[in-house]
Image (tube, grey):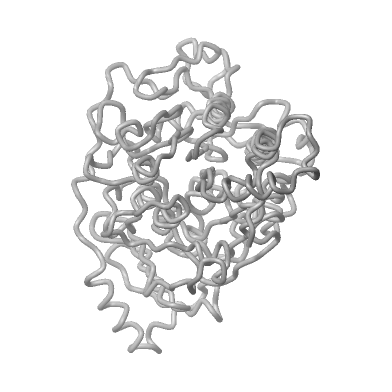
Amino acid sequence: MTRRIGRRRFIHTAGAGLSALAFPSLIRAARAANATRPPNIVFILADDLGIRHLGCYGGDKISTPNIDRLAAEGLRFTQTYAGCTVCAPSRSALMTGLHTGHAPVRANSGGVPIRDGDVTIAEVLKQAGYATGGFGKWGLGEVNTQGVPTRQGFDEFVGYLHQVHAHFYYPEYLWKNEMLWPLPGNQTGGRLPGDAGGQRTQYAPDEILDHALSFIRANQDRPFFCYLPTVIPHVELAVPQESLTPYLGKFGREDPFYDPRPGYAGSPHPRATFAAMVSHLDGHVGRVISLLEELGLEDDTIVIFTSDNGAQGGFGSRGADFFQFFEPMGKLRGTKGSMYEGGIRVPMIARWPGRIAAGAVDDRLAWYFPDVMPTLAELAGAKPPAAIDGMSVVPAMISEKEAGRKQPEHEYLYWEMAEDPGLRQALRLGNWKAVREVPAGPLELFDLKNDESETTSVAAGHPDVMEKINKILAGCRTEPMPQVEPKAVKDRRYF
């Protein structure tokens, strides 16, 4: 498939003010030259976003026109999985190409750092000549540890390092590279951030996005990797008023929700607030697309959109009403934190005009987060480390014909959470899905082809399958490194 040239680059090549149609030889030359440049990569990672929060996956309560446009102009996968069922282990699998039986960070406390010897996507792409920028929630290393982004291949980073810090939308500071970056418009006045009073004028995701857009603009003439792990729509409930107003009253009478954790903002209209947060994220996607179009880079850039795990399900019985109102995981069982499908199945959309077919849907068991590194490496013409668990899914993205090979399949997919007194695990083997939802508990078996909602375990009726799965489980993991939080930064405040 012929790759189309971006408008800005064509105009620059053909000459300002001259008709492109008058210079077919220049057009051909520009296309040929452009084809040798690897694509820019924009990777947008939402936080706790459910499949059906999006219109393109069947959601009908929240407006997401820009993300829906990505799907309409690109490829939408329906069986794609996160790296884990919670944030940090999932991001660890994403960044290193290792599933959670091998990945360095397997705890979700928020500051456990990846190691100096761990190779990240950013390091692989940087070696291939890419400018690398990270903007948003990191969760793989606190300041003064070897895990911070700028020590892991990123040229620049703006956002939150520790996950607890990333719980707040109006913090008093963010991190810019390894320096504290104050947000003077946010002052708590000595109060906890969810309390009345204080000042909340700088919505952190907006501030972070501005830096990401500046990074794209500054690196428009070279290949770039822009990693956008937004904190939206992870709760607390907070969104600028202009995004909230269109949703007020839309969902009828609402029961107020106030987060049981001290210091977290709640809302008297939680459904409207949550929907507005997702729409605000959609607006961010729209701003990225618009900038790529303005710079003439849309045809030279692959945009990938996904989420770090399944949707939040509430805090016990509290908040369950407004979370479940949106039916975020559809008929899938479980939500964030669960090893069932609802905890690990995520939206995955890839758009690359001229290279990825528009409006395509892939219903195959396609890929999961360990596959991101080798996929981006292949697109960049780089080589990932040999000892990873992922594989490239470029043939599934751009077509097997254009890739020149069939899309290989994983023997199995694996997830774990190490918890005392044992492991919670999941393993997918073709249409079979094994789940150990309770540490040291029994291993269930589901036939996803006939029971996608995982309603009935059929382990007793398939001893041969269980034997094969148990053999895989016995050898597919190593013991994790100590999952130790770093020493707290002096006077650290997460709001």
Q: Position of residue 229 (x, y in %)?
A: 49, 40
**Image position of 155 with respect to 338: above or below:** above
Please determine whether, in this image, residue 346 is positioned above or below residue 63.
below
Residue 146 shows in the view? yes
**Residue nearest the observer in this picture, 485 or 191:** 485
Q: Nearer the viewer, residue 404 or 346?
A: 404
User: Quick check: 11 left or right of 164?
Assistant: right
Instruction: Mark yes or no: residue 327 visible.
Output: no
* Residue 452 location (% of width, % of height): 55, 73
Which residue is at the front of the view, 449 or 380?
380
> What is the quadrant of residue 460 in the picture?
bottom left
- List x then y, in percent, for residue 50: 58, 52
Question: In which quadrant of the rendered image does the N terminus lie?
Answer: bottom right
The quadrant in which residue 120 appears is top left
Quick check: 278 left or right of 132?
Answer: right
Q: Is residue 281 above or below residue 51?
A: above
